[in-house]
Image (cartoon, coloured by chain):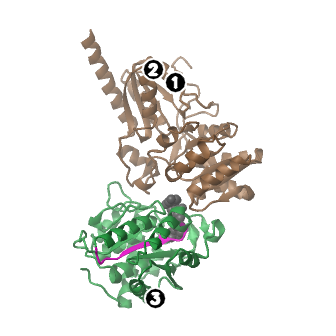
């Protein structure tokens, strides 16, 4: 099994390097989703370096915990985390979005690189996670299933169908995380189609809810995962308040960086801020 | 047609490449000024589909539906039931895939006057990859009774199509793409729903094409001409209702047919032409398109190359047909 840590300094350093690599990959690809990749970094680093039982050297291990990236467009962050965890070489990140590459623009099911489900069309991932959680229960497996959703994704009706299934089936082996950066493709969610109050809605749908004021703070993310593991009889959701574009000042809370890659100049600024010479 | 049998509608040389979705956005704004009944709905892709241009000028007739494509189609149905002319836009995969059954039940079955104008169809979507490349949308829309399905070939045709469908009562699907399209038509080009346009007459092989592949088909006809093969090129921009008369005539004038589309060869233009010819004038044919496979990430226009959707692939198909036909003839003789 992969070594896990709760050392915040180590996790912070991994997050910094994950950001650097995902930005370089996006820059090389000249397209992709910058803002929503950066907002998920601490959540993904917490999962792969502290929470999940998994083995990058044995990606088909039957008793691994499962993770589904329902907000598939944020996959540059996941690829970077998977590379750092040892699923594949960091150099492969530079093949992002190229023909035939394993690192496609949106995640395609491929256990060799640690991708558990094909996503990218929003509103699909939690259903797949439900299926995995039901199967694990059926097989008497003591494993946990995690799914990361975006807040814009909660505008999809299919998301709420899945949210209902999880609670009706009392899937306490399932933990959902919402990357609540309050932006979607076209701008701030409140200007497009507001979906608040998000925590109350999940609660009304039968979930145990934990809201994190700062979804980039490792200790609070880790303790929320701990609580999730201890919760019985209900699915657990962590609503993580995050900052779209987190970690690079020029991208933070800037709606327009949702679906574009960093330019040469922007990459320089970003690497500089992240303490890496270009 | 001039003596060279090339349509007067064609430019002499391609000099312009245009985002046809931008043409859509601009045309919608102009129509908005003429038609107070037009309302526009979009599912969180307004910058990509270019409906944002309409939104800026007519904020009160513009509805951002969020990432809720099914809800958007249902809402468009409600607008149509209340006398409005709704245009609903998003990426083709979500408009026709995600929302298919809402489109079928709420819009097309009751013949409602909803204009679904979807962008980002085909592999030319590019880097977003297979999940976002609609290769089935023509098939999914064409299979619905009452539906009109239109695939413009360039910016000039896109503008004419959008202007035409405003006055056409009934459900309509227009397929647009992300990449820049070469402008092949002069401003004088005439579009008519249900009319296929012969762009070039020929004796040996007929190429039926839609969308960006019309330009590739014309390119192919030039290559073939240099080889002494005369190719007829037909723009089948209305895939439904399909122009049986023109198609049968064009196919029977050569006896060899190639179809070309940025779509699965199953169910799309190739399928539609095969249906028409199978029942009216059985003709040997080859289909150029996505050969029953999914796409991949990559530069949109380079992917046409990657998947064999270029002029030279059409040329090769023509060669194979002509060779087969000549062998067949010698056997018969
Ligand atoms: C079903 C579906 N509709 C539309 C899209 C296009 N799209 C990609 S990301 C996005 C919205 C992004 O906002 P959000 O879901 O909040 O993600 P984040 O802000 O975390 O990047 C949209 C509309 C999609 N991927 N899937």
Q: Is residue A11 visible?
A: yes
Tell me the chain of label 2: B
Residues indicated by labels 1 and 2 sit on the same polypeptide chain:
yes
Q: Do marks 3 and 2 share a subunit?
A: no
> Which disc number belongs to residue B244?
1
Measured as percent of width and height from the top left, residue A56 is found at 26, 74
Q: Residues within 10 Å of mark 2 (few under 14, many from 20)?
A: some
Which disc, if any, is residue B280?
Answer: 2
Image position of B170 with respect to A270: above or below: above
Crowding at dot 3, Cα within 10 Å, few <14 / some 14-19 / many 20+, comes out as some
Magenta span contains residue A143: yes
What residue is pinned by disc 3? A220
**Label 3–label 1 contact, CB within 8 A:** no
User: Percent x, y for residue B237?
Assistant: 54, 34
Q: CA distance from mark 1 to mark 2?
A: 9 Å
Chain that is green in the image = A
Q: Is residue A71 above or below residue B135?
A: below
Quarter location, residue A68: bottom left
| Residue lying furthest top | B333
- Chain identifier of the residue bearing label 1 in the image: B
């Amino acid at each position: 099994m992969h070594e896990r840590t709760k050392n915040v300094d180590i996790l912070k350093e991994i997050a910094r390097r994950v950001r650097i690599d995902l930005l370089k990959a996006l820059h090389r690809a000249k397209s992709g989703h910058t803002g929503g990749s950066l907002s998920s970094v601490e959540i993904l680093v917490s999962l792969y370096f502290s929470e999940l039982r998994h083995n990058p050297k044995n990606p088909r291990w039957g008793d691994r915990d499962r993770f589904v990236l329902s907000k598939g467009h944020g996959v540059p962050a996941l690829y970077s985390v998977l590379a750092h965890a040892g699923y594949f070489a960091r150099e492969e990140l530079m093949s992002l979005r190229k023909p035939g590459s394993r690192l496609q623009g949106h995640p395609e099911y491929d256990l060799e690189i640690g991708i558990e489900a094909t996503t990218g069309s929003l509103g699909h991932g939690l259903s797949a996670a439900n299926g995995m959680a039901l199967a694990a229960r059926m097989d008497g497996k003591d494993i946990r299933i995690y799914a990361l959703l975006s807040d814009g994704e909660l505008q999809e009706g299919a998301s709420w169908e899945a949210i209902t299934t999880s609670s009706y089936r009392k899937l306490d082996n399932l933990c959902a995380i919402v990357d609540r950066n309050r932006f979607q493709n076209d701008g701030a969610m409140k200007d497009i189609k507001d979906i608040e109050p998000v925590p109350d809605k999940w609660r009304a749908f039968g979930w145990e809810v934990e809201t994190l004021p700062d979804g980039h703070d490792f200790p609070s993310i880790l303790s929320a995962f701990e609580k999730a593991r201890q919760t019985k009889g209900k699915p657990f959701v962590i609503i993580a308040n995050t900052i779209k574009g987190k970690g690079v000042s020029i991208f933070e809370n800037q709606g327009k960086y949702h679906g574009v890659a960093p330019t040469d100049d922007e990459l320089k600024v970003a690497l500089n801020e992240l303490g890496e010479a270009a | 047609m001039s003596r060279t049998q090339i349509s007067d509608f064609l430019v002499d040389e391609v000099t312009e490449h245009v985002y046809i979705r931008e043409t859509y956005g601009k045309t919608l704004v102009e129509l908005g000024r003429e038609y107070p009944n037009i309302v526009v709905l979009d599912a969180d892709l307004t910058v990509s589909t270019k409906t944002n241009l309409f939104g800026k000028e007519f904020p009160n007739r513009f509805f951002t539906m969020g990432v809720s494509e099914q809800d958007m189609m249902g809402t468009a149905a409600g607008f149509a039931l209340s006398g409005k002319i709704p245009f609903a836009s998003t990426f083709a995969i979500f408009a026709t895939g995600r929302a298919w059954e809402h489109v079928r039940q709420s819009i097309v079955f009751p013949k409602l006057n909803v204009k679904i104008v979807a962008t980002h169809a085909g592999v030319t979507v590019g880097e977003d990859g297979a999940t976002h490349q609609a290769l089935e949308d023509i098939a999914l829309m064409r299979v619905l009774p009452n539906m009109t399905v239109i695939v413009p070939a360039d910016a000039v045709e896109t503008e004419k199509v959008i202007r035409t469908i405003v006055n056409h009562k009934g459900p309509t699907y227009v397929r647009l793409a992300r990449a820049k399209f070469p402008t092949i038509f002069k401003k004088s080009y005439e579009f008519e729903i249900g009319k296929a346009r012969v762009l070039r007459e020929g004796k040996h092989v007929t190429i039926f094409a839609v969308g960006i592949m019309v330009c590739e088909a014309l390119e192919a006809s030039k290559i073939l001409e240099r080889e002494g093969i005369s190719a007829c090129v037909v723009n089948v921009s209305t895939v439904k209702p399909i122009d049986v008369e023109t198609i049968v005539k064009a196919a029977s004038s050569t006896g060899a047919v190639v179809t070309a589309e940025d779509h699965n060869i199953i169910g799309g233009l190739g399928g539609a032409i095969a249906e028409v010819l199978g029942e009216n004038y059985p003709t040997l044919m080859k289909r150029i398109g996505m050969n029953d496979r999914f796409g991949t990430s990559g530069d949109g226009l380079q992917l046409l190359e990657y998947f064999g959707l270029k002029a030279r692939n059409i040329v090769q198909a023509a060669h194979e047909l002509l060779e087969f036909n000549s062998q067949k003839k010698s056997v018969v003789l």
